[in-house]
Image (cartoon, rainbow, N blue to C red):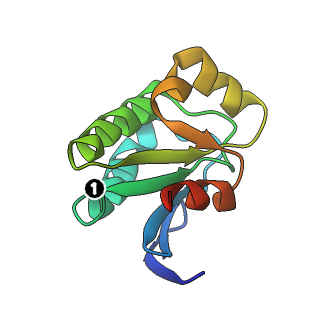
């Protein structure tokens, strides 16, 4: 596995592993107050890639504004033949993805390795 760090911010960190950017969210509850930084981090990688992994495994919950930004970015990437994959830890986040229906439009995984494996198919 080859990894390069693109953006290293405390709350949002992006690195590239085997040619796939992984945006890791290091906030337990990202909300509307974090949306601008989240969108900036996402937009920095949207132009150059058609597949992105967003790692929410450190989050307990995410606000609807964050979910909305993920859906919008996913639709943009689908137009380029790609999409977003997510990583969540079991529990509240998986439940949230199920309750909102996000798990029906975005592939969700338990680990980084599972998500990366799916991008290679």
- Is 93 located above or below residue 19 in the figure? above
As drawn, is 19 to the left or to the right of 30?
left
* Quadrant including the N terminus: bottom right
As drawn, is 7 to the left or to the right of 114?
left
- Residue at image coords 45%, 67%: 20
Instruction: Tell me the SS state at disc 1.
Output: helix
Q: Position of residue 40 (x, y in %)?
A: 31, 56
- Is 104 located above or below residue 43 in the figure? above
Q: Which quadrant of the structure image shows residue 92?
A: top right
Please rate how many residues cluster around mark 1, counting C-alpha atoms within 10 Å: few if below 14, some from 14 to 19, many from 20: few
- Residue at image coords 51%, 24%: 104
Please name whichever residue, 67 or 115, is drawn nearer the observer in this view of the structure: 115
- Is 6 located above or below residue 97 in the figure? below
- Residue at image coords 49%, 58%: 119
As drawn, is 38 to the left or to the right of 58?
left
Q: Position of residue 10 (x, y in %)?
A: 55, 66
Please name whichever residue, 22 or 35, is drawn nearer the observer in this view of the structure: 22
Please name whichever residue, 16 or 64, is drawn nearer the observer in this view of the structure: 16
Asked whether the viewer can see residue 54, the reply is yes
- Residue at image coords 30%, 63%: 49
User: In this figure, which residue is indicated by the disc labeled 1?
Assistant: 43
As drawn, is 46 to the left or to the right of 109?
left
Q: Position of residue 70 (x, y in %)?
A: 40, 38
Q: Which quadrant of the structure image shows residue 6?
A: bottom left
Q: Position of residue 82 (x, y in %)?
A: 33, 49
Please name whichever residue, 83 or 87, is drawn nearer the observer in this view of the structure: 83
């Amino acid at each position: 596995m080859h990894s390069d760090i693109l953006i290293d911010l405390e709350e949002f960190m992006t690195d590239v592993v085997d040619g796939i950017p992984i945006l890791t969210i290091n906030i337990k509850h990202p909300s509307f107050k974090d949306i601008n930084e989240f969108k900036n981090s996402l937009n920095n990688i949207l132009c150059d890639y058609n597949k992105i992994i967003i790692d929410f495994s450190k989050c307990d919950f995410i606000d609807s504004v964050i979910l909305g930004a993920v859906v919008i970015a996913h639709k943009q990437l689908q137009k380029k033949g790609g999409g977003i994959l997510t990583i969540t830890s079991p529990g509240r986040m998986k439940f949230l993805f199920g309750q909102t229906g996000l798990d029906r439009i975005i592939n969700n995984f338990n680990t980084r390795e599972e998500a990366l494996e799916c991008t290679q198919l």
